[in-house]
Image (tube, grey):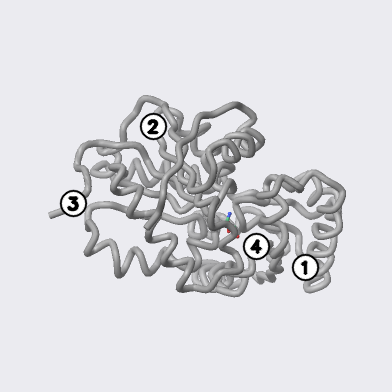
Amino acid sequence: MSVFPSVPAPIGVFDSGYGGLTILNEIRSLLPQYDYIYLGDNARTPYGSRSFDVVYEYTLQSVRKLFEMGCHLVILACNTASAKALRNIQQHDLPFMDANRRVLGVIRPTVERINEITQTKHVGLLGTLGTIQSESYPLEIKKIFPDITVVGEACPLWVPLIENNEHLNEGADYFVRKNLEQLLRKDAYIDSIVLACTHYPLLLAKIKKYTPQHISIISQGKFVALSLQDYLQRHTNIESKCTKQGKVSYFTTESVDKFKSSASIFLQSEIDASRITLL
Ligand code: DGL
């Protein structure tokens, strides 16, 4: 018997910080009819340089909290959590927590469409240290598209720049340029670069500035939204447990004022938020 509320509830969207808001934006523009609960673990962000065990522990706490809030479906709108925690949660925790609830990530939806974005079959990947070191993308891509070559570059300072609202300033240019040059030096045939971190679309203008024009920059939000739409169409048992009033509630583990002012940059509108504690 589940200890979580059984009545229909919003879809949960989780990220270590603000990055998942770029995913939430895309999901809401494709699926505006649903309700969503956004949870940002801003007090403990960034996850990117944390160990496997810590990312797993923090992510599991967040998933449990979203289940306690009633969510039947949770999207890990975070590549680092998807790379380091998703499989464990799906295989080892869900059966004990509540086998009827679901947790989905952002890596699989992106990988499934990676063949659509490359002609040369050479793709570059920008992500956190955790995502790149996990090799989750190359491993998943190899299973579906063995002819596609992927090279990754970890950008450990990009998330802190964004979380501290420094991403539009000149200092950010140095790190964006440096990581892009390092990535492009690894493979001269890259024709697409995937932003494999949900924070990175916020750096899009600078990323474009330092990328040769023939290379496309791909944000994953649309892929995740399309995959969710498809999932809900195929899993009516879950879909029927998602409330539909088009509302969003925001929760953060950090200060509400800080969340509200930074989130408004991501969302380009004012929002309300509440603080919660994760244990
Ligand atoms: N936005 C996240 C990701 O996609 C997390 C970044 C972090 O916390 O380091 O990886």
Give the quadrant of residue 185. bottom right
What residue is drawn where x is 35% and y is 64%? 89
Above or below residue 33? Residue 181 is below
Across and down, in percent, residue 227 comes to 46, 47
Disc on the earlier residue, 3 or 2: 3
What residue is drawn where x is 49% and y is 73%? 52
Which dot marks residue 3?
Answer: 3
Q: Secondary structure at mark 4?
A: strand
| Mark-to-mark CA distance, 1 and 2 | 38 Å
The answer to whether marks 3 and 2 mark residues whose Cβ atoms lie closer than 8 Å is: no
- Amino acid on which disc 1 is placed: Leu
Residue 9 appears left or right of 44: left
Give the quadrant of residue 179. bottom right
Nearer the observer, disc 3 or disc 2?
3
What residue is drawn where x is 81% and y is 48%? 206
- In the image, 198 versus 146, the foreground residue is 198
- In the image, 15 versus 262, the foreground residue is 262
Q: Which residue is mark 1?
A: 183
Residue lying at the far left in this picture: please name it: 1
Residues packed near mark 3 inside 10 Å, few (<14), some (14 to 19) or many (20 plus)? few
Q: Which residue is mark 4?
A: 127
Q: Which residue is mark 2?
A: 34
